[in-house]
Image: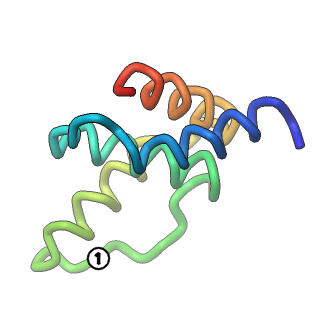
Amino acid sequence: MSALKAAFDKAVADSKNLSERPDNATLLKIYALYKQGSTGDNEEKKPSFSDMVARAKWDAWTKLKGTSPEDAMQQYVDLIAELG
């Protein structure tokens, strides 16, 4: 396992124990970076407009299209460290 993957996995665990709940925009960024880092580009079907939460998550993830999983993992690690 690479050092980055290990740091990413630790940040995922740490994200569940943040001292304060981040605002919604930050939560969407955390979600999008996690999905991009763990899955890559969003290939899922766009949720219906009536499902606002799923649509917001989908949009946030889609904005990262083209970002390498490694870059997304590093950004995720940095963001969680900043919030910690």
Of 64 and 28, nearer the camera is 28
Q: Position of residue 52 (x, y in %)?
A: 14, 69
Looking at the image, residue 32 sits to the left or right of residue 75; the answer is left
Q: How is the image coloured?
A: rainbow
- Identify whether 3 is placed above or below 69: above
> Within the image, what quadrant is residue 82 found in?
top left
Q: Position of residue 61 (x, y in %)?
A: 41, 51
Q: Position of residue 33 (x, y in %)?
A: 48, 42
- Identify whether 17 is placed above or below 78: below
The residue drawn where x is 54% and y is 47% is 12
Q: Quadrant of the C terminus?
A: top left
Of 62 and 2, nearer the camera is 2
The residue drawn where x is 51% and y is 22% is 78
> Within the image, what quadrant is residue 57 found in?
bottom left
The residue drawn where x is 61% and y is 46% is 37
| Residue type, mark 1 in image | Pro
- Identify whether 48 is placed above or below 73: below
Q: How many marks?
A: 1
Looking at the image, residue 14 sits to the left or right of residue 1; the answer is left
Q: Position of residue 1 (x, y in %)?
A: 89, 43
Looking at the image, residue 49 sits to the left or right of residue 70; the answer is left
Identify the secondary structure beneath mark 1. loop
Of 68 and 27, nearer the camera is 27
**Disc 1: CA contacts within 10 A as few (<14), some (14-19) or many (>=20):** some
The residue drawn where x is 34% and y is 26% is 83
According to the picture, the residue beneath numbered tag 1 turns out to be 47
Q: Residue furthest left?
A: 50
